[in-house]
Amino acid sequence: MPLSEEELRALEQMERALVQEDPKLASTLRGTNLRRAAQRRAILAGICFVIGVGVLMTGAIGRITVVGVLGFVIMLASATVGLAALRGSPSSHSPATHTGHQPGSMLDRFGAPWRRRHDGEV
């Protein structure tokens, strides 16, 4: 059963009140800060990966094994961090609503269980 107009208005009022009282919590519930942090980690990991390639090539050209191995370790670590940031970002784990779009507001997130129950996806 979908939410009535009165219930939707009440949820919107609660969302506005939460944003006014604790904007940091509201932002966290929306996932925007987490998404940005994951993007920053992924970008930083990409930069470190390129630096690792440079260190690896420097070690290979200069025939300095330790420097080459260090470059490989930098590449491996940055690739691991970058992939974890991309896979773990909230945007990739947000549940899709019955219309197929990603929920963007708290109202969408709170309404998703009701829509699933109504659609019989319990």
Image (cartoon, helix red, strand yellow):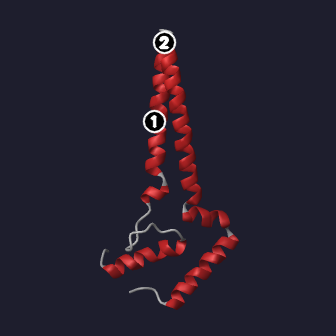
Q: Quadrant of the C terminus?
A: bottom left
Which of the labelled discs sits on residue 13, or is there none? none
Classify 5 as above or below 102.
below
Residue 6 percent coordinates (x, y): 53, 91
Classify 20 as above or below 25.
below
Q: CA distance from mark 1 to mark 2?
A: 23 Å
Residue labelled with disc 2: 61
Question: Residue lying farthest top?
Answer: 63
Residue 92 percent coordinates (x, y): 44, 56
Classify 47 as above or below 29.
above
Question: Residue lying farthest left?
Answer: 120
Question: Residue lying farthest right?
Answer: 20
Q: Nearer the viewer, residue 87 or 53?
A: 53
Q: Nearer the viewer, residue 11 or 72?
A: 72
Which of the labelled discs sits on residue 79, or is there none? 1
Q: Amino acid at mark 1?
A: Ala
Q: Could you tell me which residue is drawn at 54 percent across and 71 percent down?
A: 105
Q: Secondary structure at mark 2?
A: helix
Residue 57 percent coordinates (x, y): 48, 18
Q: Amino acid at mark 2?
A: Ile
Give yes or no for contact between labels 1 and 2 (Cβ–Cβ under 8 Å): no
> Alpha-carbon neighbours of circle 1 within 10 Å: few (<14), some, or many (≥20)?
some
Which mark is in front, 1 or 2? 2
Classify 119 as above or below 91.
below
Residue 16 percent coordinates (x, y): 64, 77
Q: Could you tell me which residue is drawn at 30 percent across and 78 percent down?
A: 120
Q: Quadrant of the N terminus?
A: bottom left
Q: Secondary structure at mark 1?
A: helix
